[in-house]
Amino acid sequence: MSTARRDEVTMADGPGGRREKRRQDSLREIHAAVRTLLVEQGSAAVTINAVARKVGMSGPALYHYYAGHDELIGAVTAGFFRELTTVLEQARDTHAAAPAGHRILEVCRALRTWAITHPAEFGWIFASPIAPPNRQQDSPRHEAGQRFENVLLELTAELWRTDPFPVPGLADLPPALRKQLVAYSATIDGRLPPEASHVFLTCWTRLYGLLCMEVLHQLDFAYTDLEPVFEDCLRGLADALGVDGD
């Protein structure tokens, strides 16, 4: 093969070549089709055949990109996680000069804004099952989920280092809870000790629980506007973290 022909093949098939570009374009089209089906018809509509029809290919052809439905779901979930995380990171970085406590509250507000404007995607992310620990380490979803978790975790760890918030005595917690908190603290490399992890996780579950109820319209019987309820929740979180809630 001539040098010119070899260079032509390399350009077509290499990492930045035409073939790879076509593949990336197809992946973006597949992900867009999944999103459209999800938003317009719900998660049950997202099947291999439905996605394939949406992008104008056969069901078997889609298997050239994903080994099956589970792999497709994992990839799309990872994409939603990355999109959401980018929004949170932008909120954090926009207030880079502010104290950690203020940045935490701004990230929480950005999370709610994304959730209520993307309810189908929010539900998809947090309602789909998580793979067992021994199967998730190399998955795109796991990696994207960790990046998402780290936004608030790192800010809370920074707050703990610079202005420690009140925590319960570890010995005062129920043994079963204490054991789990010690294990969780180890998984995050001790960035928060167990007792501080308890506060962090309690704040997260309160925030997440309220968001889920809002997105799923479970509080419509009482509220027509959840923003003041959310802000009241943030004031409670700010008190727990010992920061100014304004």
Image: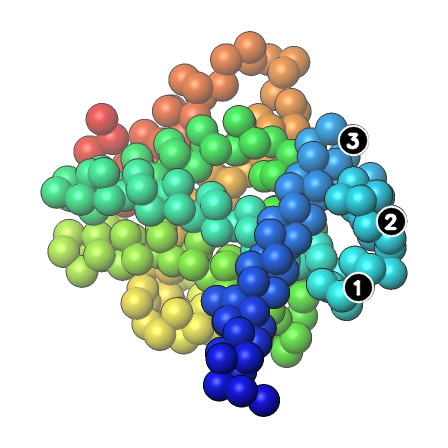
Residue 49 percent location from the top left of the image: 87, 49
Q: Is residue 35 left or right of residue 105?
A: right
Between 59 and 239, the one nearer to me in the picture = 59
* Residue at the extreme top of the image, as rendered: 224
Q: Is residue 97 visible?
A: yes
Query: Crowding at label 2, few (<14), some or many (≥20) Cα neighbours within 10 Å?
Result: some
Mark count: 3
Label 1 to label 2: alpha-carbon separation: 11 Å
Between 47 and 178, the one nearer to me in the picture = 47
Q: Quarter of the image containing the N terminus?
A: bottom right
Residue at position x 43%, y 37% in the image: 111
Is disc 1 placed on a helix, strand or loop? loop
Query: Crowding at label 1, few (<14), some or many (≥20) Cα neighbours within 10 Å?
Result: some
Residue at position x 52%, y 33% in the image: 115
Q: Reply above or below: 215 against 191.
A: above
Identify the coloring: rainbow
Query: Crowding at label 3, few (<14), some or many (≥20) Cα neighbours within 10 Å?
Result: few
Residue at position x 20%, y 38% in the image: 95
Q: Quarter of the image containing the C terminus?
A: top left
Instruction: Provide the residue designation for mark 3.
Output: 41
Front of the two marks 2 and 3: 2
Q: Are marks 1 and 2 in contact (CB under 8 Å)?
A: no
